Amino acid sequence: MNMSKKLKIITVTGILLFSSFSSRAFAKEAEIIYQPYELDLLIHNIEKPTAPIITDDYIIFTADVSNRNVGIVFDFEDYKTIHPYKLLNGIDMDGNKTPKLLFYCYERKHKLTTIKYRVIMDGLWTYDPLNSNKYYDEDMNLYLSYIEDAQGKTFLTEKEKDDCVHFIYKGEKGLTIHLAGTFTNWDPWIYTLNETKPGFYELNLPLPRGKYYYNYYIGLTPIVDNTNPNKAYTTDGRTSSVLFVD
């Protein structure tokens, strides 16, 4: 075989190999599953590790970044499957990425009234330190964390039958949570939510029909409503929650 024929064979083979590789690469890229926008927005509005955040579709568990590896196991899987937490980065004042928190998002596919779980932090099996709901299981000889009525009740800000809006905030226990919005001319000192159980804050407020922008406040720090997926940017560059009252 002369040199020119060898070059032709090599060239053709190279093209075939490249084509095969490219098709595999594009096929692999097509398999990427993108996170729903509402979920992405909800996750990125979590400012720091907090108690489990419950919505109609998801339960988001968080942990501090001081832990190198965190996982979670559930009772409905017989505690056999470890689901790893992911890292959520924030942006510091210099525009650099900085570790913000670890999180795991559970998509609610089961109609469960109670979810029991444990977390594994750097190899140590323990209860969730951010969830005040825990109990000692004598059969297992250990503490378990739990979420009550995870599917049977809706934990979110919404209008109720008496034309009042039921505002809800879930977070750390022992906080003073104020409510302000376009209905208070953004005055953060008029309304205060009541902590009805550890880390669970509520307030009923009559509001006429309309569209409202609002935030919760810890001191003068605005916080979006972590039970309401509707968000918007205000004219001064803040992120606020949006409420529609019919």
Image (cartoon, grey):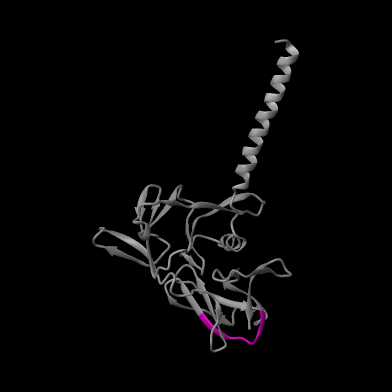
Q: Measured from the top left, where is residue 93 in percent x and y?
A: 65, 54
Please tell me whether residue 85 belongs to the stretch shown in magenta: no
In the image, taking residue 95 as reference, residue 160 lies left or right, namely left
Q: Measured from the top left, where is residue 182 in percent x and y?
A: 67, 79
In the image, taking residue 25 as reference, residue 144 lies left or right, namely left
**108 or 31: nearer the viewer:** 31
Of all residues, the one furthest to the bottom in this rendering is 162
Magenta-tinted stretch? 203-211
Residue at point 62% right, 43% down? 27
Residue at point 63% right, 47% down? 30
**108 or 65: nearer the viewer:** 108
Q: Quadrant of residue 181?
A: bottom right
Which quadrant is home to the N terminus?
Answer: top right
| Residue 38, placed above or below residue 185 | above
In the image, taking residue 198 as reference, residue 210 lies left or right, namely right
Of all residues, the one furthest to the top in this rendering is 2
Q: Measured from the top left, where is residue 35 in percent x and y?
A: 59, 56
Decide whether the magenta segment is chiefly helix, strand or loop: strand
Of all residues, the one furthest to the front in this rendering is 1
Q: Measured from the top left, where is residue 20 in percent x and y?
A: 64, 33
Which quadrant is home to the C terminus?
Answer: bottom right
Residue at point 63% right, 53% down? 92
Residue at point 47% right, 51% down? 66
**19 or 229: nearer the viewer:** 19
